[in-house]
Image (cartoon, rainbow, N blue to C red):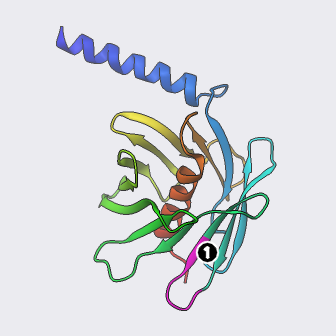
Amino acid sequence: MLGRGRREDRREQRQEDREQFGRRGSATRYKMRQKLVAFGDDFWIENEEGQRAFKVDGKMLRVRDTLFFEDAQGRELCKIQERLLRVKDSMEIEGPNGERMAMVKKALITPLRDRWIVKIGDGPDLQVQGNILDHQYTIGEGRDKIAEVSKKWFRFADTYGVQIEQGQNDVVILAVTVAIDMMAHPRN
């Protein structure tokens, strides 16, 4: 009886995921380009209609490298900075007034799957699991998926998508995705 309840729970969860993240789901979708994220470079994040939604502006500073995350009109929404003098790899996402929005850290590396932890400033921690190098992973709160990153939605090899559950902070989730990309695919 206990096994049947778990099975029904998993089936119900998969159905909810399809409604949210499926082909015609209600999740907000963005298009990202891999290998274009580098300090000193700029790139645009487009919405599913192909319109420029956010700009990531890579600045080379003397002390540490910083990416500025801006809206389409150029207003700063947050910045992503490497954290220096830390044992573990981490990047901090700060709001325009310097408040911590999130801290992205590598949690565990295994041969096939990576795990990352995202410490949210005023909310629950997020877990990132999947194949980070191939841009096939999920971001979730416990067992609840709130975002999915995948290359399978695009034909172009250098493009991947991010789907974000409605009601989430798209800016934070996209900034987390950029930070993970920077940490997982370091450029010299």
**In the image: residue 57, left or right of residue 150:** right
Q: How far across and down, in percent of the image, does residue 30 sit?
A: 67, 46
Can residue 112 be seen here? The reply is: no
**In the image: residue 9, left or right of residue 95:** left
Q: How far across and down, in percent of the image, does residue 179 sit?
A: 51, 64
**Three-letter amino acid code of the residue under disc 1:** Ala
Residue stretch in magenta: 61-67
Q: Considering only vertical position in the picture, is 23 above or below 161?
A: above
**Magenta stretch: helix, strand or loop mostly:** loop
Write the residue at 79% across / 60% down.
73
The foreground one among 161 and 96 is 96
Q: Check disc 1 and report the residue beneath it.
A: 38
Q: Considering only vertical position in the picture, is 166 above or below 91?
A: above
Q: Residues within 10 Å of mark 1 (few under 14, many from 20)?
A: many
Can residue 161 be seen here? The reply is: yes
Q: Residue furthest top?
A: 1
Write the residue at 50% across / 89% down.
63
Q: Residue furthest left?
A: 2
Q: How far across and down, in percent of the image, does residue 6 sit?
A: 27, 18
